[in-house]
Amino acid sequence: MATKTLTNQELVDLVNGLHKVKDLKGVKFALVVAKNIEMLQKELEHIDKASKPSEEFMKISEKVQGYLKDGKEDEAKKLEEENQELVDERKVQITEVQELLKEEATVQIYTLFSNQLPGDITADQVMSINKIIIDN
């Protein structure tokens, strides 16, 4: 295990990278990936909650998407204008989440030595989990 200080965005990226490799074979590898996903999801729970749109916004958004899908841009725009307060609240919420993603967090991360990586891992996959790999 290692203590690392990373931005919340880097932690989100790491969780996404871990999900990309979670089906690769190897007992030790799988344990490290699973433990890190579980731990990091708990660490990022506050951002997940902060980023969830309101139920009212979701209803309006679904209607707008439906109008756009049907080529009814004018109706979509009108609905957005009628619900401008909800749209503005969502924009503020997104800005607040972006600020949360810039904040740093110090976490304990399970690490792997490079010789513990599965033989079929790709360079793209290695890059996505590089923060937990220790060269040996």
Image: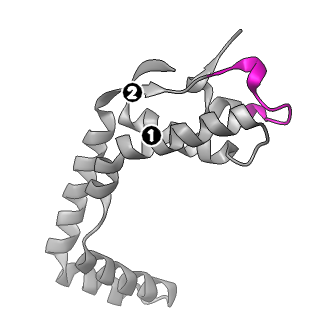
Residue 55 shown left or right of residue 22 in the figure: left
Q: Which residue lies furthest to the top in this view?
A: 136
Between the residue at mark 2 and the residue at mark 1, the CA separation in whole angstroms equals: 9 Å
Residue 26 in the image, given as x and y percentages of width and height: 78, 37
Picture disc at residue 125: none
Residue 91 shown left or right of residue 115 in the figure: left
Residue 17 in the image, given as x and y percentages of width and height: 60, 41
Residue occupying the point 43% across, 18% down: 3
Q: Which of 72 and 20 is in front in this view?
A: 20
Q: Is residue 48 magenta?
A: no
Quarter that holds the C terminus: top right
Q: Which residue lies furthest to the right in this view?
A: 119
- Chain-order first, disc 2 or disc 1: 1
Q: In this view, does 8 lie above or below 86?
A: above
Marks 2 & 1, CB-CB < 8 Å contact: yes
Residue occupying the point 48% across, 45% down: 38
To which quarter of the image does residue 115 belong? top right
Circle 2: residue type: Val
Residue where numbered disc 1 is placed: 39
The secondary structure type at the circle numbered 2 is strand
Residue 37 shown left or right of residue 55 in the figure: right
The secondary structure type at the circle numbered 1 is helix
Residue count near mark 1 (Cα–Cα under 10 Å), binned few <14, some 14–19, many ≥20: some
Residue where numbered disc 2 is placed: 107
To which quarter of the image does residue 113 belong? top right
Q: Which residue lies furthest to the left in this view?
A: 85
Q: Is residue 118 magenta?
A: yes
Circle 1: residue type: Met
Residue 25 in the image, given as x and y percentages of width and height: 79, 41
Q: Magenta stretch? A: 112-124
To which quarter of the image does residue 60 belong? bottom left
